[in-house]
Amino acid sequence: MTNQSETRLELYVRSLAPGVAREQQDRVIAQLKNLKDAAAIDDYTIEVWGKEVCATTEAARTDTGKQVLEKIAEFEQWAAQNDRSLSSVFEVQEIDSTITGDQYTSIVLPLMVLAEYHDDDLVGVAPCAYEGAPVTIDEILATLDEQTDRPLIAAGHAGQ
């Protein structure tokens, strides 16, 4: 029996991302496949979510709305416990509609978020900030890439 934990990555991508963002998403997805093929990770999943979730509307009470809000809460709890910040990742907006008179809280979802799990424990979320410095998805992938024999990060793309 081994003590090595299973490493799993979850990539959350915004649907219908514009051109440059789509290229970045495609590159990260290809890197995830390469990491799995190189046995640097055990598995990965890709989840597509929208541009935002309205946290105080009926949509938040749907299964999908609950799942997105639970995932954000899990990421924020990890950040708080690990002296990280996600404030620039999940933008919270208070909306006052002058047309309908409605008021609600909206959370703008980023183009991509990568979560790293060892077994069932969340051990990393990118992008985030640590001591004021950004930690990027590419940095997480590069760290995992160092565990393999072949480069996965194309020259000139590190740190994006």
Image (cartoon, grey):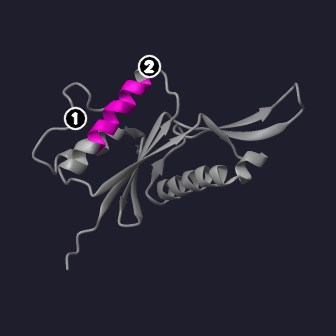
Q: Hey, what amino acid is under mark 1? A: Ile
Q: Residue at x 56, y 40 (%)?
A: 90
Which mark's residue is nearer the viewer, 2 or 1? 2
Task: Reply above or below: 121 against 61.
Answer: below
Residue farthest left in this picture: 149
Q: Residues within 10 Å of mark 1 (few under 14, many from 20)?
A: some
Tell me the tag on residue 47: none
Percent position (x, y) of residue 42? 27, 58
Q: Is residue 119 visible?
A: yes
Q: Tell me which corner region of the image, top left, top right, bottom left or bottom right, holds residue 127.
A: top left
Q: In the rendered picture of this protein, how many numbered marks are placed on residues? A: 2
Q: Tell me which corner region of the image, top left, top right, bottom left or bottom right, holds residue 116.
A: bottom left
Residue 147 appears left or right of 13: left
Q: Residue at x 56, y 51 (%)?
A: 72
Q: Secondary structure at mark 2?
A: helix
Residue named by callout 1: 153
Instruction: Specify the quadrant that holds the C terminus.
Output: top left
Percent position (x, y) of residue 119? 35, 66
Q: Secondary structure at mark 1?
A: loop
Task: Reply above or below: 118 against 157.
Answer: below
Along the viewing direction, whichever of 32 and 105 lies nearer the viewer: 32
Q: Hey, what amino acid is under mark 2? A: Gly
Along the viewing direction, whichever of 87 and 29 lies nearer the viewer: 29
Along the viewing direction, whichever of 42 and 148 lies nearer the viewer: 42
Residue 111 shown in magenta: no
Q: Residue at x 73, y 41 (%)?
A: 105
Residue 26 shown in magenta: yes
Tell me the tag on residue 19: 2
Q: Mark 2 or mark 1, which has the lower sequence index?
A: 2
Residue 7 appears left or right of 124: left
Segment colored magenta = 21-32
Q: Residues within 10 Å of mark 2 (few under 14, many from 20)?
A: few
